[in-house]
Amino acid sequence: MVDAKSSLKRIVGQIFRLLPTFEEGQDWIKPIDTLIIELTGMALSLNHETKIYQLIYKLQGIKELGPDIEFMLFRRMVFEACGIANEIQESL
């Protein structure tokens, strides 16, 4: 089984990579979808860790704002999502 801490470290990197993806005008919604799916599965295996749901909600919120989201808001939400993921990683 994959170690949750290792997965979260990788996930933090994937979340952070959303910034250059957004800035370069590439598709950032599909990577968010993938993250949401993976985190939902992780939540089930970690006994519904509350912080994981906060992270899922944050990513879903970014996605729902869609391509019209302002960069500074997108940036702030990405950093907040990375912070939540780091908190989860530290708690394991």
Image (cartoon, rainbow, N blue to C red):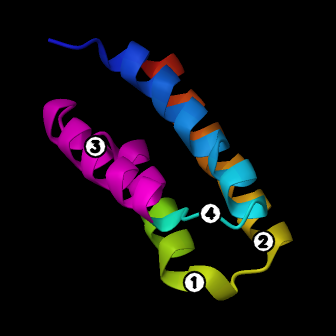
Instruction: State the CA–CA distance, disc 4 to disc 2.
Output: 17 Å
Mark 1: give few (<14), some (14-19) or many (20+) Cα within 10 Å: few
Instruction: Indicate which disc, 4 or 1, sits on the residue closer to the N terminus.
Output: 4
Name the element at disc 4. loop
- Residue at 70 percent across and 67 percent down: it is 25
- Residue 81 is covered by the magenta coloring: no
Q: CA distance from mark 3 to mark 1?
A: 21 Å
- 3 or 1: tag closer to the N-terminus: 3
Report the quarter where the C terminus lies. top left
Residue on which disc 3 sits: 38
Comparing labels 4 and 2, the label whose residue is closer to the camera: 4
**Looking at the picture, which amino acid does disc 4 mark?**
Gln
Instruction: State the SS at label 2.
Output: helix
> Is mark 1 in CB contact (under 8 Å) with mark 2?
yes
The tag on residue 65 is 1
How far separated are the C-alphas under marks 3 and 4? 21 Å
**Residue count near mark 2 (Cα–Cα under 10 Å), binned few <14, some 14–19, many ≥20:** few
Foreground residue, 87 or 8?
A: 8
Mark carried by residue 73: 2
What type is the residue that disc 3 sits on?
A: Glu
**Could you say which quadrant of the image residue 60 lies in?**
bottom left
